[in-house]
Image (cartoon, rainbow, N blue to C red):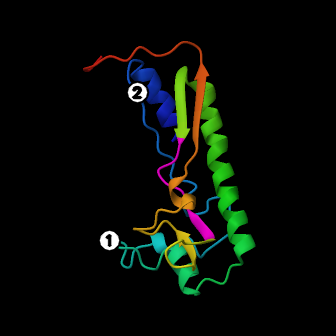
Amino acid sequence: MTEAALDASEQFPHKRLVVHYMQPHYPFVPGDTDFDKEHLQQIDGEGSEPSAENVWAQKFRGSLDVSQEDLWSIYTDNLEYALENVEDLLDGLTGKTVVTSDHGNYVGERASLIPIQEYGHPRGLYDPPVVQIPWFEYEQGSRRIIRQGDG
């Protein structure tokens, strides 16, 4: 992703980029885990439907036997993995770059409407773990001049 983003920045120096890293979503890339990979496999190799419940649904329903502490550790390792790549991206871009997230994530925090431990980012729940996201602005060199059109 980083390499593609840097190539796009070079190819289109007068355009804004939106670069979306999949991590810290599962699969937990640096983790030696299997439970987070099954959901992404397809039943017959041809369909588009996942073959198992996602990690957060498994944990919520009690079918995932991973401790809260271990799950948080695996999750943060995955985030750090992504941030190492983001750091490389920041080193290669000039101008202003914003690093943010598309959503937060419950990792065992209690939901406000029904006081149960939640996981993931279920629809309809808007507690701080899901809606408070990072916003980091980084500036290096002069700002890019953004132009409309193909140029």
23 left or right of 74?
Answer: left
Q: Report x, y in % for residue 86.
A: 60, 39
Q: Quadrant of residue 141 in the image? A: top right
Label 2: state its secondary structure.
loop
Task: Give the number of the disc on residue 46.
Answer: 1
Q: Quadrant of residue 135 in the image? A: top right
Label 1: state its secondary structure.
loop
10 left or right of 70?
Answer: left
Query: Which is in the foreground here, disc 2 or disc 1?
Result: 2
User: Where does the C terminus fall, quadrant-wise?
Assistant: top left
Q: Would you call the spot at circle 2 few (<14 residues within 10 Å), some (14-19), or many (20 or more)? A: some
Residue at image x 64%, y 53%? 79
Discs 2, 1 touching: Cβ within 8 Å = no
From this view, report whether residue 62 is shown above or below residue 117: below
Residue at the far left: name it: 149
Tell which of 103 and 59 is nearer to you: 103
The magenta segment is 100-108
Q: Would you call the spot at circle 1 few (<14 residues within 10 Å), some (14-19), or many (20 or more)? A: few
Q: Report x, y in % for residue 46.
A: 32, 71
From this view, report whether residue 150 is shown above or below residue 46: above
**Residue that numbered label 2 is attached to:** 16
Residue at the far front: name it: 113
Q: Report x, y in % for residue 147.
A: 32, 16
From this view, report whether residue 111 is shown above or below residue 151: below
Task: Give the number of the disc on residue 99.
Answer: none
Amino acid type for the residue under numbered disc 1: Glu
Q: Report x, y in % for residue 78.
A: 65, 56
Amino acid type for the residue under numbered disc 2: Arg
Residue at image x 47%, y 50%? 102
Magenta stretch containing residue 68, yes or no?
no
**Disc 2 from disc 1: Cα separation:** 35 Å
